[in-house]
Each structure stands twice: as C-alpha cells, then as structure tokens.
Amino acid sequence: MADKLPDYYFRVRENGAFVFRLDTENRQRRIEMDQIAVVNMRNGEIKAQGDRVLSEQDIQAIKEWMEERAQTLAHREIDDIMRAIDYLNNTAHWAQSRATDEQLEAVTDPLLLAMHDLRSTLVRKKAGRMS
C-alpha cells in the first residue's frame, strides 16, 4: 500500500457515495475508516453521519470529489454511447454475415423497435437544436 494514504475514502454507490475519514495515526498503525457523511450526486446533497458536524475541510474535499465524479460519469456516458455505435456496427455485420434465420427472427423486431425509438428521438432533438 502507498506510504501516504488520502485523508478521505469515498465508497461509491448508485448515485453517490459514503464518505469516510481515514486515520492511521493510532497505536496499532491500522487503517481506521470513520464514516462522516453520505453524498447524493443527483441532488448535490451532503448529509453528515449521525450527530457529526462536518468541517470546512471535509465539505471542501467532498465537493471536489463530487466535481471529479461528475466529470468521470459524464466521460463514461459518452464512452458508453460510442460503444453502442460499435455494437450496432458489429450487429449489422453479424446479421449480414453469420446470423441464422432463427437468430434473426429472435432479434429483428426488438432491434427494429429500439432503432426506430432511437432514430425518432435523435431526429426530434436535432430539429429542436436547429430551430
């Protein structure tokens, strides 16, 4: 493990994190994790754990983590969309070159409906941006 641990640890959960303050300055030199807050990324809420009062340093560290996390999630979202484009291309190649009639029968209607829904949404959004 690294010589110098960070002061805080964020246990990521869906839409946020549990925030822990790390302490290694004890007699046993063990890592102690003291939960100090819960973060909700959706509404930006920071809730102190129990009766705890968060210091300015705690709040600043949490806000910095929230900003970094939002950037990470935004990057992942675009990356997921780019992967979806790759999957669509691979699916087209599969349908043209390797798919059996039975496989095509199983996936054609759901794929066509999903692609129609996506196309309708993209066209509507593009028209909204152009006007």
Image: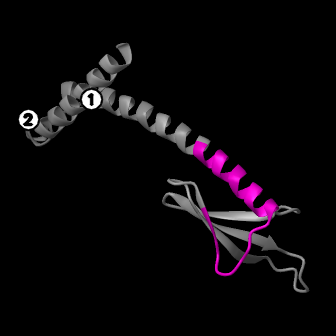
Q: Which residue is mark 1?
A: 121
Asked which quadrant contains residue 57, the reply is bottom right
Asked which quadrant contains residue 46, the reply is bottom right
Q: State which quarter of the image contains the C terminus.
A: top left
Decide if residue 98 is in sight here: no
Reply yes or no: does residue 120 show up in magenta. no
From this viewpoint, which residue is outermost toward the top?
130
Within 10 Å of the Cα at label 1, are there few (<14), some (14-19), or many (20+) other Cα atoms?
Answer: few
* Residue type at numbered disc 2: Asp
Reply yes or no: does residue 56 show up in magenta. yes
Picture coordinates of residue 128, whole percent (x, y): 33, 20
Q: Is 33 in front, or is 91? A: 33
- At 70% from the left and 70% from the top, the residue drawn is 20
Q: Where is 83 relative to 46, above or below? A: above
Q: Where is 122 relative to 54, above or below? A: above
Q: Which residue is mark 2?
A: 101
What range of the chain is rendered magenta? 46-70
* Residue type at numbered disc 1: Thr
Drawn side of residue 70 relative to residue 81, left or right = right
Picture coordinates of residue 10, whole percent (x, y): 66, 63
Asked which quadrant contains residue 83, the reply is top left
Drawn side of residue 41 relative to residue 130, left or right = right
